Amino acid sequence: MLWLKWKRWVTDRFLLLLQETSTGLASVQTKSAASPELVSGLVYFSSPSGNTHRFVERLGLPAERIPPRASEPMLKATQPFVLITPTYADGEGRGAVHKQVIRFLNDAANRTLLRGVIASGNRNFGAFFAYAGTIIAAKCNCPCLYKFELAGTDSDIARVRQGLDLFWKQQLSISQ
Amino acid sequence: MTIHSAIKPVAKAVNWNRLQDEKDLEIWNRLTANFWLPEKVPLSNDIQSWASLKPEEQQLTIRVFTGLTLLDTIQNTVGAPALMADAVTPHEEAVLTNIAFMEAVHARSYSSVFSTLCRTAEVDDAFRWSEENEHLQAKSRLILEEYNATSSPLKKKIASVFLESFLFYSGFYLPMHWSSRAKLTNTADLIRLIIRDEAVHGYYIGYKFQRALERLPEAERAEIKDFAFSLLLDLYGLETHYTEELYDPLGLTEDVKHFLHYNANKALQNLGFEGLFPEAICQVNPAIMASLSPNADENHDFFSGSGSSYVIGKAVATEDEDWDF
Ligand SMILES: [Fe+2]
Ligand SMILES: [Fe+2]
């Protein structure tokens, strides 16, 4: 595992710099160690490039996947959920939401259980970075909770875990 | 006896209605929708702004752009054609011809900037500089070694993703920096079109890399991953020298290096790997990020605000006709 050796070498090399600048990062890491109590679900879409799948794996929360191909039977949500989806927009923002995600949301039963959306993308797309989140929030009248790039960073993982925990607690207090 | 049974086709017509990999059509559609030419950008609006730069700032900008031209020239004439030989579907080959052509458009567009803003002699000097600069030539050499026909298809793809998702960024930094100071803003618009294209190129070639990698046995996968991290570190070493030489006089080197770390990690993610550089040294100057994504939603983290700050979008009609509720 030469690559791990390189990674350690890089981390060591920047250790001094890290100690000077990483107070923020350290606090994020401690927070991520606390495991959030989830009251509700996650649904995600990931194409075979797998960035969102890797993000959800690292989140370590139970999640259901929308099937990548139209030939497979569509997922039926059974409880309130937050949707995590990548963005497929061209330079004008067209086609941001994958057809399979549209199919899933076209089912009114699924749509009524949607509580919020988290979208990924690439900042190279400028104004249309993670635009799927903006589109779905507008179409389905739900909040866009977070945007991240590609497979996300460790801070993204920590923020989303904390954020979801808080979000579901708020949802619970609203519904009671 | 049938007369046609013995005929073996010497060539096959590409049928876009029979896909082996749906990603090919998805990327074809995105790339063709994104097609552009430099004439689309009113570069001459930057003439006054160019005149406001100090001579050493002008020279740096011209040099950075010749460095970028060199990388696009390599992608256009060697990189994308080398990947074509390894294509596993006829549609992938077609997508790569689009990528190859857009690399020519990118390379050509820097010359549009030059002819609009600069004096011929200064530009000729910079092209000579790009041929003589040891760091620029060294990184070209590392990449071209992997594009060699004898190299493995996987290593070619790694080199390509590193060129498109990492090596460009020491150069892209400068127009984003000028734009954040309201300088050369039209040139920055043109560079952002290139940056957008490179994102799709890196994503697609990284995707094809992952498909090929998953067919290999575990031991070979590990070897390829080691190769990728080693090559990235070799390129990073050259990039730090290149960056210091160019940006030390302006005092921007450390800022540029953060941008390099951030993009190196994104390049690794395109290949399906984890990042190499710790997050603390990937924090990019917010002015550069804003310049990279102007008009993007300011706040991407509604979790961190109070519940009332959740932005629920206005019900806007999207152009996608497939939403039927
Ligand atoms: Fe390019
Ligand atoms: Fe490219």
Image (spheres, coloured by chain):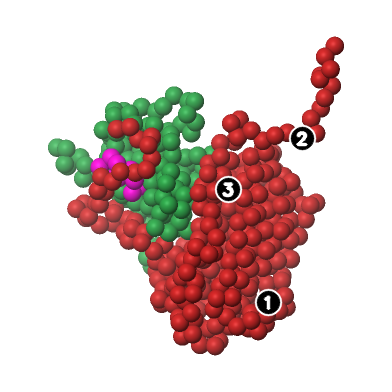
Chain colours: A green, B red
Task: Report the residue marked by disc 1.
Answer: B127
Residue situated in front as seen by the camera: B249 or B215: B249
Q: Is residue B177 above or below residue B212?
A: below
- Across and down, in percent, residue A143 comes to 27, 47
Q: For the image shown, how many numbered marks are present on the structure?
A: 3
In the picture provided, is B145 more to the left or to the right than A165? right
Residues packed near mark 2 inside 10 Å, few (<14), some (14 to 19) or many (20 plus): few
Per the picture, the main secondary structure of the magenta-coloured stretch is: helix
Task: Report the residue marked by disc 2.
Answer: B11
Residue situated in front as seen by the camera: A162 or B192: B192
- Across and down, in percent, residue A49 comes to 54, 43
Q: Residue at x 45, y 56 (%)?
A: A125
Instruction: Indicate which disc residue B204 carries.
Output: 3
Q: Chain of mark 1?
A: B
Q: Residue at x 29, y 28 (%)?
A: A109
Residue situated in front as seen by the camera: A106 or A170: A106
